[in-house]
């Protein structure tokens, strides 16, 4: 629960946990935690199903500030493990396409979700050419209308990715992103 923050009932069995619990034991543990007041049942606006949060985290909800900033999410990040959760909480349908034949790919071989101000706003298809020290941005697919702040944030995330992959150069398609990256 600490890692999930708020969890739908199916999430509790899908996140890597230790020790592993059998379904019947997990339901009993959940019932005990609810009875002891360690966890409470809650609702997530626009999402059906039972949701839970640690009781000690309830006070934090009133102090939460809106998420700010832009980052690229690795397809193997724990946030992306349970795709149905991502869809339910963020309205984002993500599937990695590395195992999809190239002719059937929609977003690219290793597309990275773009997370901006607390929501998924698109996908970026990068290719690292190690031999050329070049990070090529093959495609950017926005699912929200990009504004100047989003473009600037994405440019910063791309620069970070270039440093991480030790690419000395960045190549991007024509458009506002290229203008910001220079």
Image (cartoon, rainbow, N blue to C red):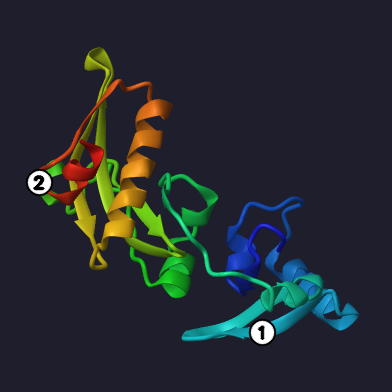
Image height of 51 relative to 132, above or below: below
For the question of whether residue 3 can be seen, the reply is: yes
Q: Image check: 95 left or right of 140?
A: right
- Point out the residue furthest to the top here: 131
Quarter-of-image position of residue 4: bottom right
- Crowdedness near tag 2: few (<14), some (14–19) or many (≥20) residues, C-alpha within 10 Å: few
Place of residue 132 in the rendered image (x, y in percent of width and height, measured from the top left):
22, 15
Residue designated by label 2: 103
The residue indicated by pointer 1 is: 42
Q: Secondary structure at mark 2?
A: helix
Q: Quadrant of residue 32?
A: bottom right
**Vertical position of residue 174 compared to residue 22: above or below:** above
Q: Earlier in the sequence, mark 2 or mark 1?
A: 1
Q: Nearer the viewer, residue 172 or 11?
A: 172
What residue is drawn where x is 34% and y is 59%? 94
The residue sitting at 55% across, 84% down in the picture is 49
Disc 2 to disc 1: CB gap under 8 Å? no
Quarter of the picture containing the N terminus is bottom right
Taking the image as drawn, is residue 105 in sight? no
Location of residue 84 (image quadrant): bottom left
x and y, in percent, of residue 88 in the image: 45, 74
Task: Please rate how many residues cluster around mark 1, counting C-alpha atoms within 10 Å: few if below 14, some from 14 to 19, many from 20.
Answer: some
Q: Nearer the viewer, residue 71 or 53?
A: 71
Q: Quadrant of the C terminus?
A: top left
């Amino acid at each position: 629960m600490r890692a999930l923050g708020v969890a739908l009932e199916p999430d509790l069995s899908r996140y890597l946990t230790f020790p592993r619990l059998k379904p019947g034991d997990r339901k009993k543990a959940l019932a005990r935690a609810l009875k002891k007041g360690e966890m409470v049942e809650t609702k997530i606006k626009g999402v059906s199903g039972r949701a839970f949060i640690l009781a000690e985290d309830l006070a934090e909800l009133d102090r939460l500030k809106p998420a700010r900033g832009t980052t690229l999410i690795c397809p193997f990040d724990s946030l992306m493990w349970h795709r149905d959760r991502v869809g339910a909480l963020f309205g984002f349908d993500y599937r990695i396409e590395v195992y999809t034949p190239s002719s059937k790919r929609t977003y690219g071989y290793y597309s990275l979700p773009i997370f901006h101000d607390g929501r998924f706003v698109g996908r970026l298809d990068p290719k690292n050419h190690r031999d050329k020290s070049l990070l090529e941005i093959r495609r950017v697919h926005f699912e929200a209308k990009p504004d100047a702040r989003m473009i600037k944030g994405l440019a910063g995330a791309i620069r970070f990715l270039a440093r991480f992959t030790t690419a000395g150069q960045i190549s991007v398609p024509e458009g506002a992103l290229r203008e910001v990256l220079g």
